[in-house]
Amino acid sequence: MATERTTRIAGLALLLALSAVFLLPFVWMLSTSFKHESRIFPPPGRPPQWLPTTDVRDAEGRIMVWYRGEAAAELGVDEAGRHELLLADGRVVTALDEEVEIKQRIGLHWQNYVRAFEMMNFFQNLRNTLFICYMTVLGTVISSSLAAYSFARIPWKGREVVFVVVLATMMMPYQVTLIPLFSVYSALGWVGTFKPLIVPYFFGVPFYIFLLRQFFKGIPEDLSAAARIDGCSEFGIYARIILPLAKPAIATTALFQFLFQWGDFLNPLIYLQDSRQYTLAVALQQFQSQHESAWGPLMAMSTVITLPIIVLFFLTQRTFIQGITMSGLKG
Amino acid sequence: MTRRERLHLRNGLLFAAPWVVGFLFFQLYPLLMSVYFSFTDYNVVHPPVWAGLDNYRELFFDDPLFWKALYNTLYFTVFSVPLSLVFSLSIAMLLNRKIPGMSVFRTVFFLPSIVPIVASSVLWLWVLNPESGLINSLLQQFLGIQGPGWLADARWAKPSLVLMSLWGIGGAMVIFLAGLAEVPQTLYEVAELDGAGRWAKFRNVTLPMLTPTILFNLVMGMIGAFQYFTQVYVMTGGTGSPMDSTMFYALYMYRMSFYYLRMGYASAMAWMLFVVILTATISVLISSKRWVYYHGD
């Protein structure tokens, strides 16, 4: 029994260590996003700083600095880059840039967030992303549930063959249809609009058709039969019996599609051309390519884009895990 | 056909109609056009010009970068997919017992896989930063080692991406957890009666019972790895640098299409990729007859 206990504890210790490794990048992201630029790159030889620091200001809002071992308030910087400092004893001195070190205390440096919001067209990008997410979720849920109903609940001739086609299209790499679709949309004048990102979702998405069909098949056939005897139309059965019973599967579909769309990159990259149309994912990438070493604002923006997903995950954990399990196992 | 069958057929097709229309317009038509484009010179602005087998000939004989991109993609697939499988299964095994805080652990391992890829790529650029990144700072601080240049070094760039992919194994782990939960407890009890130890139970009960799940994760992992794009696009600014060491297949195809507007050539590339994915998938499926054990049916 002693060995049993030992392995249990060893397993737990291993898990703790591994989860620390998995969390570390997140901690690093958060910590960097709240750091003053001077602390993001520690001077050579000094260890990285985990707790974010911010500058210290005096009662008049002036930045506090260290100057030759003394605390001083900065009055201003002249054109040559020299600092005018007010020492504690009331003397005013001029100091060279390298003589001055900005005083830091542990605290949150929010300026990275402010800068990131200003440098990106954040609220516009957020609106675009939410609009596209909302529309594709709507389209996916309606069209995929209709098709799934057909494949799961109506015994029509040839449906098994057609369903194999649905599955086969899932295996097709997106690269194959990418170029012809681009050429069609460009002929329609849709390039540079949201249409190529939204319209296809109103025509059924194979993965969700598959997922919903699995769920619909699990609903007892008697319910449909009874409704048919009562004179209920096929659409009535779909809308009033099956959909309400399939709420968990519909929720999974909506959730997955929302998440996918929130992070989708390739299609918005190809079809959106004006920066005012960008989704958050594209905007972040563009921001990164223009400000490669602005790690503070970059981490701030990454945090802002990631946080809603994490919150959404915590609110919907069970739906989530069930959905993934459903897609993976029942195949 | 009875009246009832006709009614079912009509209703069935009506309900499936959105998908049928979508299939014709967004799948079948583009598919056929893609075959056609692959035999043409086409730049979207002007109509395609027939070029016969020129694109394919160039791919095979005159484009070293095509082979490089294929090699890079295969390298990534060969390392990332098996390592991810082993890693996600190991974590699932560790989690598959009564431990305090199980759902917290599960969340921690799962979260990285749902972070938007652009955000996680930007984050990993910073984690892998040679001067002040997380990994090299820790190596310096605790081991006194000067870490490698990671993405800035042609030899380390692909291993960096493999390393990063291991952070995103959450989805596979959850599927393994579900697979583990379905292994009948009685099998373990029987094995224990036969005196099986921990390893013997894993080798003779867990692993065979999990083979269908392993197959699923393997095929999904492979298909995903062959199409790997967003991470390299973000992390190399779309260039595949340094020295084309991260010029992956999908990235090269993207550049052909949207930088150089060689849509015909890129279509030929797409079909080559399709052939590669199909061959790999079918090989795995054929081999699976010998190693996948279907319990019960």
Image (cartoon, grey):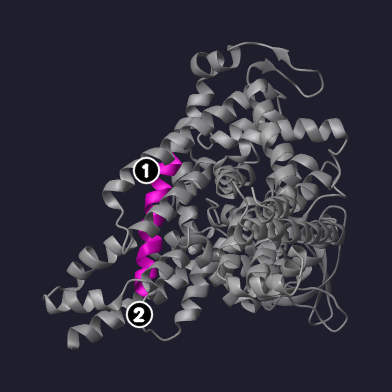
**Residue at label 2?**
B97
Q: Which residues are magenta?
A: B75-94
Task: Report whether residue A42 is seen.
Answer: no
Task: Determine if marks 2 and 1 fall on one subunit.
Answer: yes
x, y percentage for residue B183? Answer: 33, 71
Q: Tell which of A318 and A242 is nearer to you.
A: A242
Instruction: Please state if B192 lies on the left or on the right of B99 as rendered.
Output: left
**How many marks can you see?**
2
The amino acid type, in three-letter code, at marker 1 is Val
Residue at 56% across, 55% down: B124
Res B55 → quadrant: top right
> What residue is disc 1 on?
B284
Q: Quadrant of the C terminus of chain B?
A: bottom left
Q: Residues at badges 2 and 1 in contact (C-beta under 8 Å)?
A: no
Identified by mark 2, the residue type is Arg
Give the residue drawn at x 49%, y 14%: B61
B122 or A144: nearer the viewer = A144
Q: Marks 2 and 1: which is nearer the front?
A: 1
Q: Residue at x 80, y 73 (%)?
A: A63
Residue furthest out toward the bottom: A1
- Spot occupied by residue B38 in the image (x, y as percentages of width and height): 63, 21
Is tag 2's residue or tag 1's residue first in the polypeptide sequence? 2
Q: Secondary structure at mark 1?
A: helix
